[in-house]
Image (cartoon, helix red, strand yellow):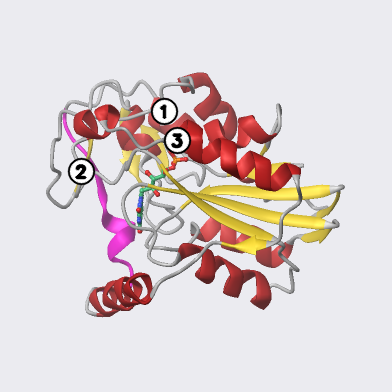
Amino acid sequence: MVFYFIGTGNSLYIAKQIEENPVSIPQVIHSENQEYSADSIGIVAPVYGHEVPSMVKEFLKNAVFHTDYFYMILTYGNRHGGAAELAKKLCDECGIAVHYINVIVMADNWLPSFDMNEQKKMEKHIEENMAAILADLGARRNRIAEVTEADRAAHRQFLDRMSRMPADAWQHLLQVTDACVGCGICEKVCPATSVRVTDGKAVHIPGNCQTCLACAHACPQKAIILTVPEVNPDARYRNEHISLQEIIKANCQK
Ligand SMILES: Cc1cc2nc3c(=O)[nH]c(=O)nc-3n(C[C@H](O)[C@H](O)[C@H](O)COP(=O)(O)O)c2cc1C
């Protein structure tokens, strides 16, 4: 049993290599029964600020997992900042006995720092790295990926920067421009009902936004932009192996 969370499909591409039909966290998080039993249980999710998205944290806190082998695979784009160690701490806090946590570098979909056209071209050795992870999982290896002092320092610096920003800053990261034609794709790819089409135009609703950027990346008009400067506002990203329909199926809350 593999659970996943996505904004742009990287984590689904990885999850599908482990199991044919992984389960989307946004589709089960509101289910009454949050008890899962399986021979092995895995979580595949992107790294946001060196940690897992808040919806994944909520899922781990509320669900009960009965398994002999629990693992997490975290996709990241540039600097994981000790994500494996932070995920281990989260599992400990949630009372989850975790056997394996690894990270895998993929295209970085963070628009303020990266040009998606460049990211699409970069060689990140995904297939080789994934083959090693699959071998580990096949052998039921016990391992938490190595974290260096430099990783920990990067995370401390990040937390320091965040502490000087308003607590809800990330909730106001997205805005809709006049280019919006009200097609509603943004609404369908949002895992958190944080975008709504009202009077023929998309509106971003702060509060529960996961900042997954699914709406911005999937908008055919590029009408959803960030409130902070983007490296290339013309470039958007979706994992080349994942269709828009798969993103909608994973995230749609309608
Ligand atoms: C809000 C946000 C924060 C991110 N933070 C990090 C980060 O701290 N380090 C990193 O290397 N990549 C970071 N990324 C990039 C993603 O982790 C990476 O592109 C991931 O593979 C996206 O997965 P998805 O396609 O399944 O959504 C961030 C992306 C977003 C949207």
Q: Mark 3 points at which residue?
A: 126
Can you say whether 234 is above or below 93 in the image?
A: above
Q: In the image, residue 80 lies at what x, y percent?
A: 39, 59
Question: What number is the disc on residue 239?
Answer: 1
User: Ligand 1: does it lie within 8 Å of the C-beta at label 3?
Assistant: no
Residue 164 visible from this viewpoint: yes
Residue displayed at 50% across by 59% down: 52
Q: Is mark 2 on a helix, strand or loop?
A: loop
Q: Distance between the residues labelled 3 and 2?
A: 18 Å
Label 1 or label 3, whichever lies nearer to me, is 3
Q: Name the residue under label 2.
A: 114
Which one is earlier in the sequence, the residue at label 3 or at label 2? 2
Which one is earlier in the sequence, the residue at label 1 or at label 3? 3
User: Ligand 1: does it lie within 8 Å of the C-beta at label 1?
Assistant: yes
Mark 2 Cα-neighbour bin, 10 Å: few <14, some 14–19, many ≥20: some
Q: Is mark 1 on a helix, strand or loop?
A: loop
Residue displayed at 33% across by 67% down: 168
175 falls in the magenta region? yes
Q: In the image, residue 70 lies at what x, y percent?
A: 74, 57
Pick the quarter of the image with the C terminus.
top right
Check disc 3 and give the amino acid type: Ile
Check disc 1 and give the amino acid type: Asn
Check disc 2 and give the amino acid type: Phe
Which one is earlier in the sequence, the residue at label 2 or at label 1? 2
Residue bounds of the magenta highlight: 166-178
112 falls in the magenta region? no
